[in-house]
Amino acid sequence: MHGAVIPGCPETYQSTQQSEQQQHFQREHEQGQQSRYRQGDQHQKVRRVRQGDIVATPAGVAKWVYNDGDTPLVMVSLLDTSNNENQLDNSRRSFYLGGNPQQQRQSQQGRSSHKGESLANNIFNGFDDQMLAEAFGVNRDIARRLKGQNDNRGNIVRVENGLQVIRPPRMDEEEEQEYQQERPNGIEESLCNVRLRLNIDNPSKSDVYNPNAGRINRINSRNLPILRLLNLNAEKGVLYRNSLKAPHWQVNAHSVMYVTRGDARVQIVGNYQQPIYDGQLRRGQLLVVPQNFAVVKKAGDNGFEWISFKTNDNAMTSPLAGRNSAIRAMPQEVLMNAFRISSEEARRLKYNREEMEIFLQGLSLKEETLLNYVTS
């Protein structure tokens, strides 16, 4: 479950609880007497997340995550400190409302510029007990607990007996999500109602699909409009065994690639004589591909899967090979003169790959020899 607390939005998830005594008063009300109710809980919308979901959260919004499943939940977070919403410097800062995340703050401790400055456990820790008590209308003991000074659990805590929050039944929730995916959802809508989540791991909704080589799913501001505010988009790629992702570059964005499964050989080239990266990427590793630098990926024997975050809500990819590529779009004569190749070689360069972005394993030596024999 994921909760994002957006300032100014109403608590639209509400419950009313009645005790036996209150039910008695309700029966009296039916006889003309006044009913008495005890107010239950109310909070902002809670969203269910699952494997493959992209969750976009506006800057400065408080959020929480709870794993109510039977398997561990692994999340990859991207924080863009260069975003226009960040009015501080480019240092990463996490402001915790709860918990005692001392370990997460140790790396920031060394950057404290003022003598004697120390970082608080959470944001409540710096406030005076009495001030907190008055602000929340509680006693000082509760105010001190907000600070988490004697709480050594960190920022991830175990919930005993499960987390009880207000949520619609699973079927109603799924029907609501299907409805939201079918209807328009532009930025002109209230931020309180805007969709924050969209799954990127659905093969049936692939943007690029090769049944023998793999697939690519993309999420941008056109199908998740809130990304326009964040100026980000995402791409999920799956390469089957020994398949190739065509060499390409990002026209208008940097790309941060995180490997989720398998391994691949990856090369990144730019305006240098040698690749700026040429190595084997494996699960759990991360690689940054700068704008306009070309990259190629070839999956290993176990296949290769990755998620990429790009610094533009409508990032554009320019392939070098295959259908819709830069090379294929050029006149044959231009290729002949640019690379000093024959007309037939230029034709092969343009048309040998009919796939789009994802290729099967390249020509074997035997096939290449046969092709040279036929065309000579």
Image (cartoon, rainbow, N blue to C red):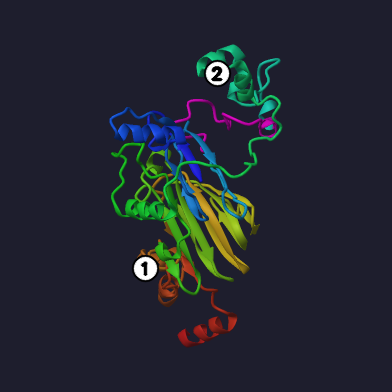
Q: Position of residue 287 (x, y in %)?
A: 59, 50
Q: Is residue 280 above or below residue 95?
A: below
Left or right: 36 as drawn, with respect to 130: left
Q: Position of residue 229 (x, y in %)?
A: 39, 38
Residue 300 quadrant: bottom right
Disc 2 marks which amino acid?
Val
Residue 124 quadrant: top right
Question: Mark 2: few, some, or many residues within 10 Å (few <14, many ≥20)?
Answer: few
Residue at x 49% of width, y 50% of height: 49
Residue sitting nearer the eye, 20 or 369: 20
Left or right: 18 as drawn, with respect to 284: left
The part of the chain drawn in magenta is 80-106
The overriding secondary structure of the stretch rendered in magenta is loop
Q: Quick one: SS at disc 2?
A: loop
Left or right: 32 as drawn, with respect to 219: left
Q: CA distance from mark 1 to mark 2?
A: 80 Å
Kindly tell me whether residue 18 is visible in this rendering. Answer: yes
| Residue for badge 1 | 333
